[in-house]
Image: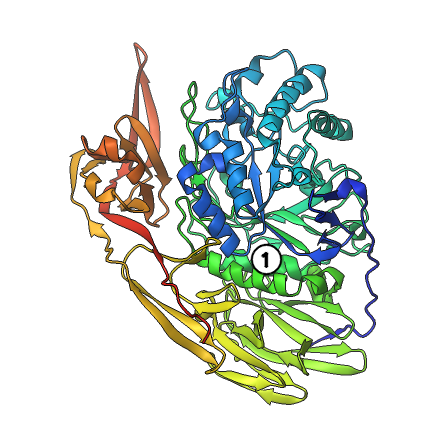
Amino acid sequence: MYELDISNVPEKRIYPLGGKFSGTAPDGRRIGFTNVSMTVDGKPFFGISGEMHFARVSPDQWEDAIVKMKCGGINILSTYVFWNVHEEEEGVFRFDGCRNLRAFLALCEKHRMMVIMRIGPFAHGEMRNGGLPDWLYGKPYDVRENNPGFLEAVRRLFRQLHRQMDGHYFSQGGCIVGTQIENEYQHSCAPWEMTAGVSGEWITSGHSGLDYMLALKKIMLEEGIATPFYTATAWGGAVTPVEEALPLWGGYAYQPWLFYSKPGIHPATPEYIYRDNHNSAVTREYNFEPSYDPESRPYACCEMMGGMMCSYKYRFQLDMRAVDALANTKLGSGCTLLGYYMYKGGTNPTGRRTPYLNEGQVPKRSYDYQAAIGEFGQLRESYGRLRAIHMFCSLFSGFLAESRAVLPEHLKSLRPDDLEPLRFSVRVRGDSGFLFVNNFQDHAAMHDRAGDEVRLLLPGREVTFRFGIAAGENAILPFGLPLGSATLDWATAQPLARVGGTWFFLAPEGMEPAYCVDGLEFRPRPGEAFRAGNQVIMTLSRRDALDFWVYQGQTWLCDRPLLWDGEKLKVEMDGGGAELRVWSEREQRFVLRERLESGLCPAPLPAQQVGAGRYTVELPAEAFAGHKLALLRVRYRGDIGSAFAGNELISDNFCNGAPWDIRVDCYADILRGQPLVLYLTPVKKNVTVDASAMAGLQEKAELEASELLSAELVLVDDFTVREGEESL
């Protein structure tokens, strides 16, 4: 039994942050911030930001990615601008191909997607030199410092970026609503890849304090980069001008950078323990040490782990439950703006002078990041799990802005490896709220829970939750929730959406769904609906919730990506078929609407070994024509996989046991005349380099042979759902 007294929780004092955190569009639409949340037209707005780097995505996939982000519940797209991608050669700016920022912004506007530009000058993002061009290394000034030489080079960059962004600012009716100033200043840096493998020199993290950050904002404004608000990363003691920019936070539970110099065992992190991060009385928590009164600014995030890349010395397959469990934990800690890095993976572009623009510890080309949307648009389990969280945030945006987080006492001293106590918090306003429960911990095995009880002491009454929950699962459970003419006293199920007179809930794994409505209890099975006053409540299993979509006032179940692009409803398939079921208000159940057969089937391809770890794969390039996407799906054993089309490295992979997808349709012309070459390097042990006279150097090692296990061609297409009467 756990007990939490929330009978006397004070209301939040809410006030606007003023003109430096607001802006108006030509049509009168207003964006702003109070000290608790973002606002649109004066009303609380729950911002959900997803990171996608336009230069890391092929232009022919931009629109597909934006649509998938929007369908996943993202309403703000955040993107880095990497300086070295656009000015690799001093004075020569490139905005062609995947660098075409203006064309990308036009697509964001087409789909009404707000954008935050993270323009640096330093970015990091596992890019070479953290995004700084090589030519800065030889300049007679220090980078990332408040000196005239560096700031003039930055001004030239910002001037060029403004020319691309001009016409797309919110004040002009465009999509750009925010601009980030620098990144992790005086907290983080990156290697100078110029000296990698020799001196191991690092770029400075900076020493110029607030003066440098304010100088950057001044240059932005002077060059025309004017947006409703500006942001700055605040974690780790980073310098944050909170009077001029919104401080943003984040958290990563998988941290490959711990092993850049040597391998090791990853510790369990405190990321999955609830904290009180919007409370003036609590000014120091794990990964949250603000330089300001916490209640004077929203608790907002921009870099919550939306996936994670493998580094050379730390390989793993991300547990997809880690992503929404982190979102749950941030919400239960007072967050009112979620932001994921990365939400959409990508592929590093190549340069003219420096072919590979990656940081040395990560793959040269692939930046898939095991993100919710993969390198080529693949949707992962985390996509569906996050969508459920995002529906909740949209449904209760006003409540979340005005509620307070209250935590049980035992969490204050809880260690991440202490797996027995229940991890929970409450967001409350008056006698209504939500109980947040998390049963996931990175790098440790939680256990299935059963028979937990949480008693909440409310003004004038008590609410007791009794439940179990599966290992790795999380939940958001309501109490005191108005349901039309009735009141939901409590429920051991999570609200998903309200469509018309029907409420949809999901039953987390290991939790029996139960509802108490005006004192009467209901225990439906997942898939069963019941009436509560003038409302209907439908409960979905966690599995069905992954397939739950809401578009244009219609509610669907589809086990393939079901995407609304603003004009048509489409199903994306890479084989087999799909069943679309639509909610029938009349029958109070999901009924079959349409069956689609793709006619696609992954095709095994023969491969020929032509050397030690080298294979050729003959691809039927003519089969690519007319398809949305063609992927070569490779399974192998080894250390690093590299794929070549002609003389170009098109993809690489640090082996972690998961399938490796390589996009091949865009190389059809090359592959018609020659095979694709795979080079799979072996895992090496006990490596030594013998030296002899005449500079005779020879590597010796124990090798574990690499092996190609399979290669298959996967074709991806969109299938339009037939038009017709959808309301049943």
Where is residue 395 drawn, in percent x and y?
Answer: 63, 65
Q: Residue at x 59, y 57 (%)?
A: 327
Where is residue 406 drawn, in percent x and y?
Answer: 74, 65
In this view, 707 is above or below 448 = above
Q: Is residue 261 visible?
A: no
Say whether residue 598 is left or right of residue 434.
Answer: left
Where is residue 369 drawn, in percent x and y?
Answer: 46, 44
Farthest-out residue, bottom: 520
Secondary structure under the numbered disc 1 in the rendered image: helix
Q: Nearer the viewer, residue 321 or 649?
A: 649
Q: Residue at x 63, y 86 (%)?
A: 533
Q: Residue at x 77, y 27 (%)?
A: 211
Say whether residue 113 is left or right of residue 673.
Answer: right
Q: Quadrant of residue 573?
A: bottom left
Q: Is residue 418 visible?
A: yes
The amino acid marked with disc number 1 is Ala
Q: Residue at x 52, y 80 (%)?
A: 512
Q: Nearer the viewer, residue 700 or 292?
A: 292
Q: Quadrant of the N terminus?
A: bottom right
Say whether residue 3 is left or right of residue 292.
Answer: left
Say whether residue 94 is left or right of residue 718.
Answer: right
Q: Quadrant of residue 13?
A: bottom right
Q: Which residue is mark 1?
A: 327
Q: Quadrant of the C terminus?
A: bottom left
